[in-house]
Amino acid sequence: MLRLASARTGGLVALAAIVAALPLFFPNNFYYDVAIKTALNAIVCIGLNLLIGYAGQISLGHAGFFALGGYASAILTARYGWPGLLAMLAGAVGVGLLAFAIARPVLRLRGHYLAMATLGLGIIVAIIINREIAITGGPDGMTVPRLWVGGWRVSGAVAWYWVAAGALLLAVWLSLNLIDSTLGRALRALHGSEIAAQTAGIDTTRYKVLVFVISAVFASLAGSLFAHAEGYVTPIEAGFLRSIEFVTMVVLGGMASTFGAVAGAAILTALPQLLTVFQDYKHLVLGAILIGVMIFMPNGLVPSVALSLRRLRPPVPAS
């Protein structure tokens, strides 16, 4: 009972309950489509949160990893006839190896230098995808075959909702376990002070590389699922604005908070759809909401709400 009431397990159970109940309120497939995009964006943000929120390393190039995962699945299944799950796994391995290869030189940098380096990585990926027309279809993108799992063809908004929801819950569970592991403790020490962490005997370079690779693999798998769910993938998914969107989701929801990453992804994916009633003023209203949240909740949405709830609790009497 105490374990169920813990923030970690209780939060995961609450998220699972929300995911299970949401379809009861969806009147048509449009809402399923928004929910699917929300779940896949949240998976990217969960991995990115490990890098930014826990390790304190900024990345403005994660849209590149997202797009590479999508294009790996698209190319391997459409052009070479690979099974979808095998193509997805191959894409994740390829992206992980790429992230490992560039992590050591890139993560030697700090602050805005690191941000510029990761931004450059995303731009390079976008340029390659646009230029290699014979392989990627260029600016027009390419179609992606539907995903088969054994003998089951994943098709339709409802089926994809449950696939995306299951992947999201798995990503949250993995993230929570990583945070409570030796890796998570090392990342928190690294975020607090890299010099102090090194003095304590922590191999900071190793852990920075490891969390960079993990976050890239999260993005790649989400990109593969996105490509199969949409049935189409374009170079827009590797764009600079897409990377900024992912970072904004993490910051808005609350850095160093797995559930904050999910909340930030949900807000920034669903809110623009809800604000279409404002027509030409949609982006103005969205910007004002984001500014208001960051002014009044500087730690992010979920940590700020959690702190407010803790303050409202009656004090425990001394024994």
Image (tube, helix red, strand yellow):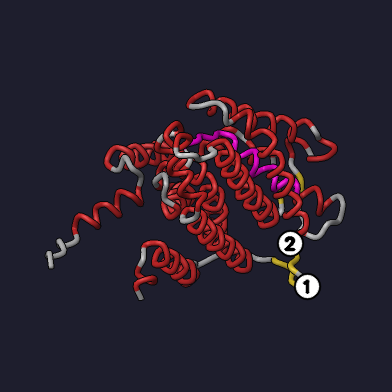
Residue underneath mark 1:
151
* Residue drawn at point x = 39 percent, y = 67 percent: 10
Q: Which residues are magenta?
A: 56-72
In the current view of this chain or complex, which residue is farthest to the right? 80
- Residue 119 in the magenta stretch? The answer is no
* Residue drawn at point x = 19 percent, y = 61 percent: 313
* 152 over 232 or under it: above or below: below
Report how far apart the C-alphas of labels 2 and 1 lie in the structure.
Answer: 10 Å
Pick the quarter of the image with the N terminus.
bottom left
Pick the quarter of the image with the C terminus.
bottom left
Residue 188 is situated, as x and y percent measured from the top left of the image, at 43, 44
How many C-alpha atoms fall within 10 Å of the one at disc 2: few (<14), some, or many (≥20)?
many
* Residue drawn at point x = 54 percent, y = 48 percent: 47
Rendered image: mark on residue 252: none
How many C-alpha atoms fall within 10 Å of the one at disc 1: few (<14), some, or many (≥20)?
few
Relative depth, front residue between 252 and 2: 2
Question: Is residue 280 among what the camera can see?
Answer: no
Residue 48 is situated, as x and y percent measured from the top left of the image, at 53, 44
Name the amino acid, label 2.
Answer: Leu
Residue underneath mark 2:
147
Which secondary structure type mostly characterizes the magenta part of the structure? helix
In the current view of this chain or complex, which residue is farthest to the top? 113
Residue 30 is situated, as x and y percent measured from the top left of the image, at 55, 59
Numbered marks: total: 2
Name the amino acid, label 1.
Answer: Gly
What kind of element bears circle 2?
A: strand
* 175 over 24 or under it: above or below: above
Residue 295 is situated, as x and y percent measured from the top left of the image, at 29, 37
* 244 over 226 or under it: above or below: above
Q: Is residue 168 left or right of residue 87?
A: left
Question: Is residue 46 among what the camera can see?
Answer: yes
